[in-house]
Amino acid sequence: MSSEKSGDVRATRHIRLTSHPGQQGPSGAPAIHWGAATAAKRGPVIGTTTNRSQRNVIGTHSGSYGVYRALAVAAGNLVKGHRADLTNTSPTDLIGPNPQWGEAEKMVSIDPWGASVADVFSEHIAQGYDVRPTIAVTKAHIDLPEIRHAMVFQRLIPDNRVLLENGSAVVTKVAIEPVWWLPGVARRFNVSEADLRRNLFEETGGMYPELVTRSDLEVFLPPIGGQTLYIFGNPRDLADSNVTLTARVHDECNGSDVFGSDICTCRPYLTHAIEECIKGAQQGGVGLIAYSRKEGRALGEVTKFLVYNARKRQLGGDSADKYFLRTECVAGVQDMRFQELMPDVLHWLGIRKIHRLVSMSNDKFDAITGSGIEVGERVKIPDELVPADARVEIEAKIAAGYFTDGAVPDGDQLAATKGRTLG
Ligand SMILES: [Zn+2]
C-alpha cells in the first residue's frame, strides 16, 4: 500500500494500547452506575472505537461481528470512525422502563437502556459522544410451513390480528447485544471478579488486556452472539402478570432450526412453541420466543458434529444411555449454555410470571424460578413431533431431569433407545 509511505498516515498507525489507565487521553468518558434507576444516573455505555477518550467499557459493539467490521476497515470498504446515522431507527414499540431496570443484580448481561439511547442520551450525542444502541426493536410478519400446516388442520384459525389469512403471523422482534456488568456476572457464577476477568482474558488468547489491567472498567461488550425476541401480541402486556404469557426460551440449533436436521427436537419444539404463542395471543394473552445464539449447547457446531460422529460410531451404536457421556468425552462438559444469564432478558421485559413455559429443560426452569419469576404450567413437546432419530436425545434428557408428565425411562430402556447409523 503506497499510503503507508506517507508520513502523516504512518503517524496514525502507531498501535496505542488501551491496557493502562492514563493512556486514554483526556478523561471524557462518562461514568456508568450500573443498576441506577434512571438513564441519566446510570450513564451511557460507550464502546466506540472512534474516539477512545469517550470509551467507558472493555470491548466493542456488535459482538462477534466486530471482527467483520475490523476486516471491512482493513480492506478499505468501511471508513474508520464511521458514525451511524440513527434517523428513523427508533424502536417501533416501547419496552419499559420496568422496575427491574433499577435493580443491579436482576440484569447483569443487558443494557436496559440499549434500545432508547438516541432518546435518553440525546444530550450526550449532541455533545459529540458516540453512543450506539445495543438493542433494536422492529415489526415483522413471519411465515412458517408448520403454522400453515396447523391452519390446514384447523388447530389455528386466522384472526387477521395475530395470524393473517395468508398464514403469516404478526410479530414484534427485538435484537439484543450482550452488555456484561462484570461484578454482577461474577456473582451469578459464584466466582470472584478477578478470576472471571483472568479466565476471560486467558481463554480468549489474551484478546482484551483491559480485563486484567483496568479494574476501573466494569462493563464488557463480549465478542459473542446475542439474542432475538419474537413477541406475539402487545409487548407491553409482558410486564402485566394478569395477562397470560406463553413463552419459550430457545437456544440456537442451526442444523435443526433452519435445515430441519432430524437428530434433535429443536425445530419441532420451536415451531410448536410459536403455535402455542399465536394461540395464546389470540385468546387475549401474549407470546414470547427468546432465541439465544448459543449453538450446540454453546460448544459450537464443530464440536457438535464431532459428538454426532462419536455417538453414531460407538460400540453398540447411538443409544440414549450414552448420550451425555459422548458429549463430555469430546467437549469436556455436557453443556456450556449456562442458563444463569438467560433470565436477564425476561426481567428486561418486566416479566414476573410465565403462565405457560414451553420447555422441558430443568436448567431453564430452575434459572427462571431461581431469579424470582413464577412459572405456571410447563408444556412438553407433543410425542408425535419428536423425529425418530431424536428419541435418543429426548429420552436421555428426560432421564437426566427434563420435565415429563409420563414415565422416566430406566437404564434398560435408555440402552434400548437407539438412533440411526451414519450414512
Ligand atoms: Zn438441535
Image (cartoon, rainbow, N blue to C red):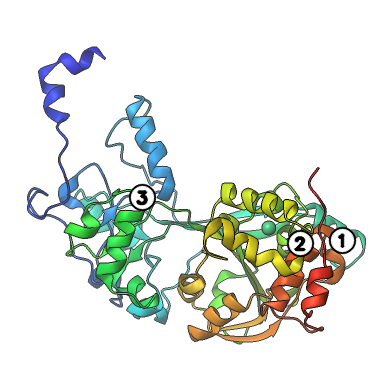
Determine the residue positioned at 72% across, 71% down. 396
Residue 374 location (% of width, % of height)? 57, 87
Disc 1 packing (10 Å; few <14; some 14–19; many ≥20)? some
Q: Is residue 266 visible?
A: yes
Determine the residue positioned at 67% across, 77% down. 400
Q: Which residue is mark 2?
A: 163
Residue 75 location (% of width, % of height)? 36, 25
Disc 2 to disc 1, C-alpha distance: 10 Å
Task: Specify the amino acid type for callout 1.
Answer: Met
Task: Specify the amino acid type for callout 3.
Answer: His
The one nearer the camera, 398 or 8, is: 398
User: So how many labels did they put on this image?
Assistant: 3
Disc 2 to disc 3, C-alpha distance: 35 Å
Query: Mark 3 falls on what kind of element?
Result: loop
Evaluate if marks 2 and 1 touch, with contact meaning CB atoms under 8 Å apart. Answer: yes
- In the image, is 145 to the left or to the right of 105? right
Q: Which residue is mark 3?
A: 61
Q: Quadrant of residue 273?
A: bottom right
Q: If you read the primary sequence from the N terminus, does the residue marked by circle 2 or circle 1 appear first?
A: 1
Determine the residue positioned at 31% across, 30% down. 79
Q: Which residue is mark 1?
A: 151
Task: Specify the amino acid type for callout 2.
Answer: Leu
Question: Which quadrant does the C terminus fall into?
Answer: top right
Q: Is residue 58 above or below residue 273?
A: above
